[in-house]
Image (spheres, rainbow, N blue to C red):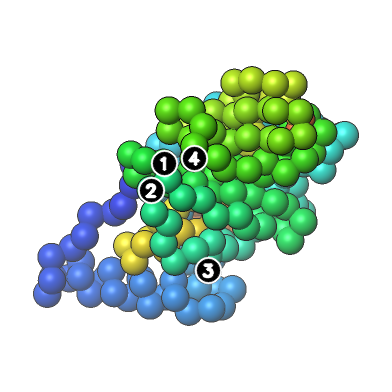
Amino acid sequence: MSVTEQPPVPEPGTDDDAAQAALEDRISADSLTTRRDYLRIVATVSGGLAVGGIAVAGGVLHRHGDTDSAPEPKRVTGRLAPGESIAFRFPGEDDRAVAVRLTDGSLVGYSAVCTHLACGVLWRKDRGSEGELYCPCHEGVFDARTGEVTAGPPPRGLPKVLLVEQGDGSVWAVATARSGENAQDAVCREFADERPEVRAQLGCPVANDANGEKSRRT
Ligand code: FES
């Protein structure tokens, strides 16, 4: 299941219904603990998303998503209609990002910092067959579905912001992916240390201990 897919809606009156209601209550509560609980769901639904060809200008530009600890999930918007976009900041307040609902309903998220010279990338739904991410500084163009460069001088595609859509239509940013990193690896990197159950669910790789031997960190 990709991050843009919805979990099955339980039948009313079932145990699953009660469990879903309890889960939504936890998600809606604004506390560190409940947001961490939410990541368990995030990890589950993020595992199947393929994210390829993502790059950043390491050492030159601020690397999107480069934080000391796992980011908190951030509510981006209550709803996003097909063809529309919304700008937001994630994972930090200096990290410009954009979420787009493609015309087929797919939800995609990217860093809005151009990989050429760091101008702001804009969503232009009037360009291309299904809209494009466009940098006006030197006419850089990125594919809306993949974030890859399709025209202009940007040397690399846009880093992705992994998004989850909840049953109420709200859109959440949950993680970022680095250069060449797929979604599962990104979630493992950002959350496995703090959430052993995420590591277990996704089969995240174990770490090397001081002797260079493989070991689990719990
Ligand atoms: Fe975006 Fe040059 S800064 S194309």
Residue 180, percent from left and from top: 63, 27
Q: Which residue is mark 4?
A: 125
Q: Which mark is first along the chain, 2 or 3?
A: 3
**Residue at horizontal 63%, vertical 35%?**
134
Select label 4 or label 2 by which is in front. Answer: 4
For the residue labelled by badge 2, is the local secondary structure a helix, a strand or a loop?
A: loop
Identify the image quadrant of the N terminus. Answer: top left
Q: Quadrant of residue 120?
A: top right
How far across and how far down the image is residue 142, in percent?
Answer: 60, 29
Q: Secondary structure at mark 3?
A: helix
Viewer-side label of 3, 4: 4
Q: Is mark 4 within 8 Å of ligand 1?
A: no
Q: Is residue 66 visible?
A: yes
Give the residue type that dot 3 points to: Arg
Coordinates of residue 73 in the picture (x, y in percent): 56, 61
Counting every numbered tag in the picture gives: 4
Residue holding disc 2: 82
Q: Which residue is mark 1?
A: 102
User: Tags 3 and 4 in contact by the CB under 8 Å rule?
Assistant: no
Categorize mark 3 by other alpha carbons within 10 Å: few (<14), some (14-19), many (20+).
some
Q: Which percent across, then down, holds residue 86?
A: 55, 55
Q: Earlier in the sequence, mark 4 or mark 2?
A: 2
Residue topped by disc 3: 35
Location of residue 212 (image quadrant) = top right
* Local SS, label 4: loop
Gap between marks 3 and 1 measured at Cα: 27 Å
Q: CA distance from mark 1 to mark 2?
A: 5 Å
Q: What is the C-alpha distance between the residues marked 3 and 2?
A: 27 Å
Q: Indicate which disc, 3 or 1, sits on the residue closer to the N terminus.
A: 3
